[in-house]
Image: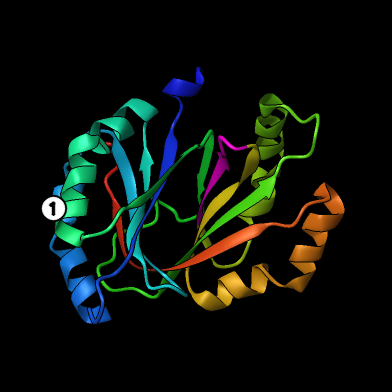
């Protein structure tokens, strides 16, 4: 499979307007569920609120880069600038492997307490993309057994990093995995420190590419 044909994850963050309460942000998110549920090539969307800044947005899983680019076109960026008054932060990550640990797939929810994390680790020198992909496949069984982990997208960043997008049942599950021992293991194994972004994920929308 070519890189352009493989699935991609897109992480979007938009600064929340000043004084906008969280309940209003979530209500506006819920009002767009039908729209996102009908987008060609979108298989899953996690509606997100970044835990520290309050930035709102989403984590999207697309069947390929072409489907993602068709949505995130110039008109989309202009619409966000006009409606939100700020520049969106949009990052694309090839996602060669996705696992879902829920029988039948992680279901939709409109008001949950799930947590998503984006992890990026600088790739050690000399490690090629095909080696990363092979490592993802070898690690699949380990992540199938992680308590509280609903989904994981294994990702490769254009800037030479690798990692994953994790969807957790709750914050306790995420914190139990990303503890100090985990950070120490990353440094020991890769010689690099991981960058971890944490998001509240109140709304989950599986579409399965319809």
Q: Is residue 127 magenta?
A: no
The answer to whether residue 47 is visible is no
The quarter in which the C terminus is drawn is top left
x then y, percent, for residue 102: 46, 56
Residue at horizontal 51 percent and vertical 42 percent from the top: 98
Q: Which residue is mark 1?
A: 34
Does 38 appear above or below 49? above
Residue occupying image coordinates x 54% and y 37% = 97
What is the total number of numbered labels drawn onto the structure image? 1
Q: Quadrant of residue 65?
A: top left
Residue 52, given in percent of the width and then of the height, sits at: 47, 75
Q: Depth check: give the residue in front, 80 or 199.
A: 80
Residue 34 vertical placement versus 16 (above, below) = above
Left or right: residue 107 compared with residue 157: left
Nearest the eye: 83 or 177: 83
147 left or right of 59 in image: right
**Residue at 14% in and 57% down:** 83
Magenta span of residues: 151-159
- Is 178 drawn above or below residue 125 in the view shown? below
């Amino acid at each position: 499979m070519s890189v352009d044909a493989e699935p991609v994850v897109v992480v979007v963050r938009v600064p929340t307007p000043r004084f906008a309460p969280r309940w209003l942000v979530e209500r506006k998110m819920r009002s767009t569920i039908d729209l996102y549920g009908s987008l060609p090539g979108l298989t899953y969307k996690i509606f997100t609120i970044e835990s520290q800044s309050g930035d709102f947005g989403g984590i999207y899983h697309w069947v390929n880069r072409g489907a993602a680019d068709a949505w995130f076109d110039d008109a989309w960026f202009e619409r966000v600038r006009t409606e939100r008054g700020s520049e969106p932060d949009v990052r694309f990550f090839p996602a060669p492997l996705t696992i879902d640990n829920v029988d039948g797939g992680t279901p939709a929810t409109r008001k949950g307490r799930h947590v998503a994390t984006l992890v990026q680790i600088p790739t050690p020198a000399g490690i090629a993309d095909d080696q990363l992909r092979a490592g993802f496949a070898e690690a699949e069984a380990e992540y199938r057994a992680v308590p509280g982990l609903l989904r994981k997208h294994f990702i490769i960043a254009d800037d030479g990093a690798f990692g994953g997008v994790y969807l957790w049942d709750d914050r306790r599950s995420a914190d139990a995995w990303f503890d100090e021992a985990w950070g120490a293991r990353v440094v020991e194994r890769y010689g690099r420190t991981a960058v971890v972004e944490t998001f509240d994920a109140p709304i989950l929308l599986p579409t399965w590419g319809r």
